[in-house]
Image (spheres, rainbow, N blue to C red):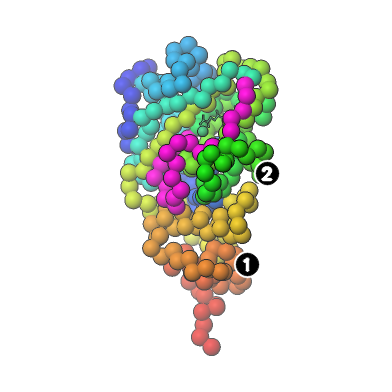
Amino acid sequence: MASSAPYNATHDCDPTLDDQGVIDFCRNGYLMLPGVVPEEINQKVVDFLDHEDDTYEPTPIMKQDWFVESVLLNPQAAGAVRSLLGTNFTLPAIISNHRGALPFEGQRWHRDGGSLYSHTLEYLQVFYIPEPCTEDMGPTELLPGSHFMRTKGPLMAHYGKIAGTVPATGPAGTIYLTIYNIWHRRSRATSKARFKSKYRNLLKYNYWRTEPPKRDWIVDPDLDFNRIDFNPSAGHFEQFQGGIAAARMFCWLSGIEDQYTKRGGQCWPVAPTVRDGANQMGVPAPLQNSDRESSHTI
Ligand SMILES: O=C(O)CCC(=O)C(=O)O
Ligand SMILES: [Fe+2]
């Protein structure tokens, strides 16, 4: 049923990510949620994009209640958005479709326009594929951790194959969340259309934060923050720098940025091999182990 579109409407729901899930998002800059949208809805979306609005900005799809409920407010996706952006996040005002007639050529490496390097997380860029996307169907290629990597766009555009990238493949109904400035590109599609659409449809939209950050996702009281590896998996940074940036973002999200001190050297989070419950130098007070064997005066 069609109704008015809830552009910029605020929404709240229960968070679904725990501390480790939030840390992994800070480290890697993306989260895959394979096949979370029901197939009946995926088929309706494909029909809508092929027959009702085949433009690169089919924003009016937000007038369809079934799209809002099952895609934008999909329980797993909205729960992850709620975990990262807090209560009362806003729904999108624009829906893009990176629609490619199969097969197609790839893109150059880029960050989307308007990117800022930051440890803050004011908004999320989210993608949704209504049909399966295999490696030969030109999935978006992501470079984990690159949301913190400072390279100018015109230079990045000349890079070729990079080790450690991840293809955003998945079954129909896959949604993936990204930090806006992650490096990415459309990869080359060698396959012809294999499903209902002649296109590889890829919807893209943003959610925005309205509340100050705080650690109100699923808190794990047993997590030892001294033993966590904050480094992004792809490992393209100078030693530890990716982990340092990810830990700063985690502290900002937890509302404890004022307690994050980076004094250099082996200051938290670069020394996760501490033993026997000892705290690393500089671990913020709310994340410390309380029974600190190493803090005894001798
Ligand atoms: O089509 C894709 O996989 C990504 C497209 C993209 O990143 C862009 O056009 O900015
Ligand atoms: Fe892009």
In the image, farthest residue toward the bottom: 298
The alpha-carbon separation of the residues under discs 1 and 2 comes to 27 Å
Label 1 residue SS: loop
- Name the one closer to the observer, 229 or 13: 229
Q: Amino acid at mark 1?
A: Thr
Up the image or down, 151 lies above or below 169; here it is below
Is residue 76 visible in the rendered image? The answer is: no
Q: What x and y, as percent, mark residue 153?
A: 52, 40
* Residue 6 visible to an observer of this rendering: yes
Mark in the foreground, 1 or 2: 2
10 Å neighbourhood of mark 1: few (<14), some, or many (≥20)? Answer: few
Residue 127: give x, y in percent of width and height. 50, 32
Tag 2: amino acid = Ala
The answer as to whether callout 2 falls within 8 Å of ligand 1 is no
- Say if the magenta span includes residue 230: no
Viewer-closest of 208 and 20: 208
Which residue, given by chain and number where applicable, does mark 1 sit on?
273
SS of the residue at dot 2?
A: loop
Q: Which residue is mark 2?
A: 163
Contact between marks 1 and 2 (CB within 8 A): the answer is: no
Classify the position of the N terminus by image quarter. Answer: top left
Q: Which residues are magenta?
A: 104-126
Name the residue rendered at 43%, 22% in the picture. 57
| Of the image marks 1 and 2, the number of the one nearer the N terminus | 2
